[in-house]
Amino acid sequence: MRKFNINVNGKAYAVEVEEVVDGSTSAAPVAAPVAAPVVKAAPVAAAVNGKPVKTQMPGLVKKLCFANGTQVKAGDTIVILEAMKMDTPIAAPSAGVITYSTSEGANVDTGAVIATIA
């Protein structure tokens, strides 16, 4: 038996696969799902009177388009969120200085605050 860790649709599975030597087939036992490690974003100090930017779907933060403290304009793409194998741009709702509260590679839920614009 050989053991493998496989990720399917964001869920991690520990599986054992049996090699077939004589050509016969046998089912490989599959273990129960193992919780996939979720990358937690490091907390970043947000502006006190800033406007929060929230996600509208769960996904993976693929790219932060600006550095913290950068002046952005309304409509600028500030984050690329990958959901269901598609890249979705998240736009700045207003102009101001951006402060991210997530990091690249983090998994976020619907309604998560990913940045603040003050």
Image (spheres, helix red, strand yellow):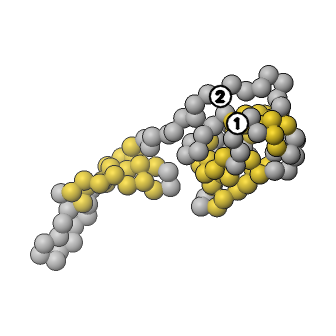
* Res 59 seen here: no
Location of mark 1 (residue): 68
Classify mark 1: helix, strand or loop: loop
Q: Position of residue 34 (x, y in %)?
A: 39, 43
Classify mark 2: helix, strand or loop: loop
In the displayed image of the protein, which residue is found farthest to the bottom?
23
Type of amino acid at the residue the image marks with label 1: Asn
Q: Position of residue 74 (x, y in %)?
A: 87, 46
Query: Quick check: 78 left or right of 85?
Result: right
Q: Residue at x 70, y 56 (%)?
A: 88
Type of amino acid at the residue the image marks with label 2: Val
Q: Which marked residue is nearer to the observer: mark 2 or mark 1?
A: 1
Location of mark 2 (residue): 44
Camera-side residue of 13 and 83: 83
Compute the Cα span from label 2 to label 1.
9 Å
- What quarter of the picture does the C terminus occupy? top right
- For marks 2 and 1 on the same chain, the one whose residue lies earlier in the sequence: 2
Q: Residue at x 34, y 52 (%)?
A: 5
Camera-side residue of 22 and 87: 87
* Res 32 seen here: yes
In the displayed image of the protein, which residue is found farthest to the left?
22
Q: Position of residue 17 (x, y in %)?
A: 24, 60
- What quarter of the picture does the N terminus occupy? bottom left
